[in-house]
Structures are given as C-alpha cells and as structure tokens.
Amino acid sequence: MQTKYEQEFIRFGLKVQYYRKLRGMTQEAFADKVGMSWSFLAKVESPTRAFGVSMDKIFAIAEALEIPASKLFEED
C-alpha cells in the first residue's frame, strides 16, 4: 500500500511485534487472542511494507497486549 504514512505504519507494526514478543506470544497465539488471522497479523508486523488497520483492530491489539493503545504510537 502506498501512503504518505508508510514509515508510521511500519513503526506501528514493529511496536506490535515488540510487545507481542515481550509477552512471549507467537503470532498464531496472539492472532487467536485478538480474533485475527495469522496472515493478517503477519502483514501488520511486516517490517518491509505498510499495512493499515482500523481503530477497532488497534484497540483489540492493545487490549490483548495489555497496554494502552497510545504505546503503539510512541517514538523511542
């Protein structure tokens, strides 16, 4: 997906991946917990392409990771 926010989408996905791994979850287990397919989650976490998600999915991801949604947008 071409977007002017490509780097932000990629950074978001890497944050999801970071917190998922911090919680010791595989993509498959996390996808089940969030109610998404494994392949969808793999696209979100991809470090090489931008993949946007809806606000509903952002909040579901944050809830499953037990963090505020804002943590997924913080810059280090």
Image (cartoon, rainbow, N blue to C red):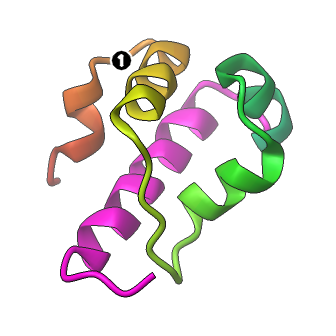
**Residue wearing tag 1:** 67
Residue 21 relative to residue 56: left or right: right
The boundaries of the magenta stretch are 1-26
Q: Residue 46, percent across and down?
A: 58, 69
* Residue occupying image coordinates x 40% and y 48%: 15
| Residue in the image at 28% along x and 26% along y | 69
Q: Quadrant of the N terminus?
A: bottom left
x and y percentages locating residue 62 in the rendered image: 42, 23
Image x and y of residue 22, in percent: 55, 32
6 inside magenta stretch: yes
Residue drawn 79% across the image and 38% down it = 26
Look at the picture and state if 53 lies above or below 66. below
Kind of element beneath mark 1? loop
In the visual, does 37 lie left or right of 51? right
At horizontal 55% and vertical 48% (from top left) the residue drawn is 17
Question: Observer-nearest residue: 70 or 3?
Answer: 3
The quadrant holding residue 66 is: top left
